[in-house]
Amino acid sequence: MNLMLSAKNELALLIVLFVLSACSSVNKTATSGHFSTVLIDAGHGGKDSGGTSGLHNPLFIREKDVTLDTARRVQAILKRAGLHTVMVRDGDYFVELDNRVALANRLGSGTVLVSIHYNATGSAAPKGVQTFFWHANSHGLATRIQSRVVEATGETNVGVTRRRLRLTRNPEIPCVLCECAYLTNPNELVKVADSNYRQKIAEGIAAGILEQYRIGDSGTSPVPEIWAPLSRAQDGRSF
Ligand SMILES: [Zn+2]
């Protein structure tokens, strides 16, 4: 009897040890990206509509509406996956770019910033997905989001672009800005108007973030850090 009990106890102990070691290895992998919070930035808002599909287009879409919709979808997926999320805005109101940067810096290390935008130009031809980054520590995240959004949507891969913008240069945490599609391209506009397509975009963005969360920069090519002065309002681009 005693022998049996002790055998049982030993087995229980082994199971506990196994579970503990499994947990610790999961944790190690899970923290490779060195973040647990995602600051999701829906571009524009309030008085700033961002780009539009064009006033004369029968299908009139404002960038600020689809960025918020996409951001909410990304948040829902990340929350289900157990990540902590913070929304820069969760409604139709304006937040200054510098305040978005300040919020990112207040959250600080352990957070990454993902800014969601839709592109618009004066011509109907440009199309595709493009992700911007500036700091070397943001290249892996940009690469993963870019390839996952292209994979999820089947859209043209414009690529990952290193550009000094207020939301890629100024935050002190890893930060990227994704231009998910062109509102001025007739084919992409019709797709973006469909909530199923925005869900696909959101799934791509979230998949890229979760991949970075799990394995960090592993497998992505490193880039050197480049110093540049802070990006200012008078430098131009409105994001
Ligand atoms: Zn924008």
Image (cartoon, rainbow, N blue to C red):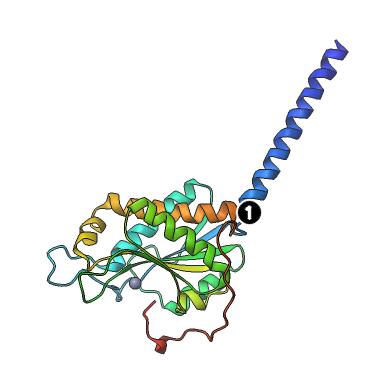
- Which amino acid, mark 1? Thr
| Residue under label 1 | 31
Q: Is residue 115 visible?
A: yes
Residue that extends furthest to the top in the rendered view of this protein: 1
Q: How many marks?
A: 1
Crowding at label 1, few (<14), some or many (≥20) Cα neighbours within 10 Å? some
In front of the other: 90 or 75: 75
| Residue 174 in view | no
Is label 1's Cβ within 8 Å of ligand 1? Answer: no
- What residue do we see at 79% from left, 19% from top? 8
Residue 178 vs residue 190: left or right?
right
Residue drawn at point x = 40 percent, y = 89 percent = 234
Determine the residue located farthest toward the bottom in the rendered image.
234
Q: Nearer the viewer, residue 90 or 214?
A: 214
The residue at 22%/77% (across/down) is 122
Please give left or right for residue 59 compared with residue 135 in the image. Answer: left
Q: Position of residue 13 (x, y in %)?
A: 79, 28
16 left or right of 27 in image: right
Residue 226 at x, y = what percent?
A: 57, 79
- Residue found 51% across the figure and 78% down from its top: 169
Observer-nearest of 7 and 222: 222
Question: Of helix, strand and loop, which one carries label 1?
Answer: loop
- Name the residue nearer the viewer: 149 or 35: 149
Q: Is residue 22 rendered to the left or right of residue 230?
A: right
Quadrant where the N terminus is found in the figure:
top right
Q: Quadrant of ligand 1?
A: bottom left
Please tell me whether residue 31 is drawn above or below residue 124 in the rendered image.
above
Give coordinates of residue 26: x percent, y percent. 65, 44
Residue 67 place in picture, x, y as percent: 34, 63
Q: In the picture, which quadrant includes the C terminus?
A: bottom left
